[in-house]
Amino acid sequence: MQQLIKHIYLLLHNYKINKVYNCMTRLRLQLTITDNLPLGEIKKLDGVMGVVLDGNELQIILGPGKATAAAEIMQQFINNKTISNPDFTAAEQLHTAIRKKNATPFKLLLKKISGIFLPLIPAFIACGLITGLLNIILKTDASLSLNPIIQILKIAGTSVFWGINIFVGINAAKEFGASPMLGGTMAVIITHPALSDIMLFDEKLSAGRGGIIAVLLVVAFSSWLEKKLHNIIPQMFDLFLTPLLVILLATFPAIFILQPVGGIIADFIGQTVTTAISSGGMLTGFILGGTFLPLVITGLHQGLTPIHAQLLAKYGVTVLLPILAMAGAGQVGASFAVYCKTKNQRLKKIIISALPVGIMGIGEPLIYSVTLPLGKPFFTACIGGALGGGIQAMNNVGASAIGISGLPLTAATDNMPAYLFGLFTAYLTGFIVTYLVGFEDPDE
């Protein structure tokens, strides 16, 4: 790993790496200069599964477990050796202007959504799997529900949903450039159970109405207000006066305006998704499962995370995730067909290293190193995902976790036989269609 990151660093140091971070599978580098990047040379390095350039962010796909270590090593190289070149000054100014132009509100919103929910994924995975495994155990012997150990595990499995509004409030305030604890406090205010004891205009207030959608609206407002107050209040009074005014001024609009609006939006999302899947059945699942891979490569799938989280918080399961997970399954089948037909040994090596990861539900390595570069297999993978998605929707399969996909999601679903049937259908369909349609085999 050290040698690989050293090669990447030497290829990129003249492009001025401003920031290093990572997600589950990718080393992410923010660059000042993006002209004439040596993308082809990086792709050829052993250990690199794919490369994506998104604006000024270079994403190098390394696979799970490697991205975190890669980010740490890259940061060490940057800290130990700072390289500057005065010839790049004019280019840096030009690219700064280009980045500002390309930073559309929608793209910035998706990045903020990703920043809010990505830190919560490990908790969703852990709690969802605990809940799923408990469901399996209790189906075999319902009397175990009285066992103290099982009861404690039930608490552990649902814990993330008891605190989700607070977590989202804290992370949202960070993304909006405000105080995280004030964001968390505003989330508590609209979730506090004592709200249900208050009568207003002969109606009881509703604690937690609108879920995370309401939290996002409320914290966006309180964060905006906080930043405005920082600019107005003298520095010597800012420490105690700003947070006081934020809570005082934001609480009533939050409860009387933003929370009801959030409730309407959340109800609309929940009813629309569940109605579309239950009434549209297989057709809805076919469309959703077949179009998810294009959403992934555009980054628009990030906008679905709050929807999954809202469905989980309201219904205990998300019926959307099992459908969308079939896109990755179709790609696994398509990639295995490529492995069986290709004569390219390097491509075989890439597929055999990325297939286990794809089966575990992480599809980016296969997307960017196999199906998308080859063209046809990307679309035949979508066909496999569509058929698998139709089966999931037809059986109304729900999942109690987000952040996982593929085979591991089985334990978190409420209908494991139906989920596995759809999963293996997507595998098989992706394989057969890709094998029959074929592809242009790349040279070594």
Image: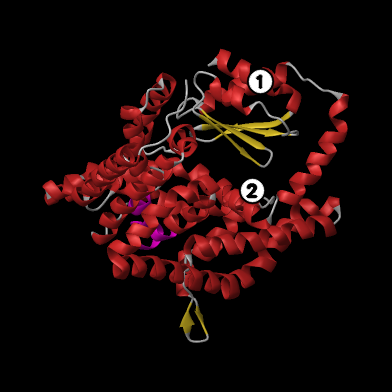
N-terminal label among 2 and 1: 1
Q: Residue furthest top?
A: 3
Residue at 25%, 55% (x, y): give it: 391
Q: Which residues are magenta?
A: 310-324
Q: Which residue is mark 2?
A: 174
The answer to whether 290 is drawn above or below residue 74 in the figure is: below
Give the CA distance from mark 2 to mark 1. 30 Å
Q: Nearer the viewer, residue 188 or 220?
A: 220
Q: Amino acid at mark 2?
A: Lys
Relative to 138, 366 lies left or right:
right
Label ID, residue 54: none
The local crowd at label 1, few if under 14, some if 14 to 19, many if 20 or more residues have their Cα within 10 Å, is some
Name which quarter of the figure residue 134 lies in: top left
Residue 244 appears in the picture as rendered: no
Label ID, residue 9: 1
Residue at 53%, 74% (x, y): give it: 260
Residue 53: x and y in percent read: 62, 37
Main secondary structure along the magenta-highlighted residues: helix
The local crowd at label 2, few if under 14, some if 14 to 19, many if 20 or more residues have their Cα within 10 Å, is some
Q: Nearer the viewer, residue 323 or 204?
A: 323
